Image (tube, rainbow, N blue to C red):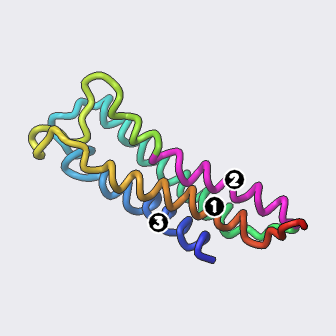
């Protein structure tokens, strides 16, 4: 059950946390952002919502067999972590910052939260996929 709890925490961060962070004065309502940047911000918000819902679906979906449960947990690991991994890697592109100068940047204050959420997804899915495995002797 701990695995499902971790995956649910990750899903909540995807469905609620990320959109709140992006739909505010530092992003969507930032007057310094051009319309095309806001378009991609909207795309990111939608991606977060869809990945969070997919993670919840595969986390709590019943499975007829242990093999199917492992497949669902692999899907949860992917849908629950890919947004956060992409966010962590985004700092590698030229000219990017995790925080604009008018809000105290440069910096990357999201990194610990992104890493925490990715670990919740990956560890949660691993714990759930491992539950019920019987060691062969």
Picture disc at residue 77? none
Nearest the viewer among 65 and 13 is: 65
Q: Name the residue under label 3.
A: 12
Identify the residue at the far bottom of this view.
Answer: 1
What secondary structure is marked by label 2? Answer: helix
Q: Write down the region rendered in magenta.
A: 65-84
Q: Is residue 74 above or below residue 11?
A: above
Picture disc at residue 74? 2
Q: Where is residue 72 in the image (x, y as percent from the top left)?
A: 73, 58
Label 1 near label 3: C-beta < 8 Å?
no
Left or right: where 40 falls relative to 118: left
Q: Where is residue 69 in the image (x, y as percent from the top left)?
A: 78, 63
x 72%, y 63%: residue: 129
Which mark is nearer the camera, 3 or 2?
A: 2
Label 1 near label 2: C-beta < 8 Å?
yes
- In primary-sequence order, the first of circles 3 and 1 is 3
x 20%, y 47%: residue: 26
Q: In this view, does 47 lie above or below 18?
A: above
């Amino acid at each position: 059950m701990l695995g499902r709890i971790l995956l649910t925490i990750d899903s909540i961060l995807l469905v609620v946390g990320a959109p709140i962070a992006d739909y505010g004065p530092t992003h969507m309502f930032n007057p310094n952002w051009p319309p095309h940047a806001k378009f991609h911000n909207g795309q990111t918000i939608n991606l977060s919502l869809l990945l969070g819902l997919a993670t919840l679906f595969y986390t709590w979906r019943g499975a007829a067999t242990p093999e199917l449960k492992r497949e669902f947990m692999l899907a949860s690991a992917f849908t629950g972590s890919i947004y956060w991994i992409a966010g962590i890697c985004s700092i590698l592109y030229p000219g990017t910052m995790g925080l604009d100068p008018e809000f105290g940047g440069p910096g990357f204050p999201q990194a610990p939260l992104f890493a925490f959420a990715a670990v919740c997804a990956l560890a949660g899915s691993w714990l759930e996929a491992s539950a019920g495995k019987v060691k062969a002797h």
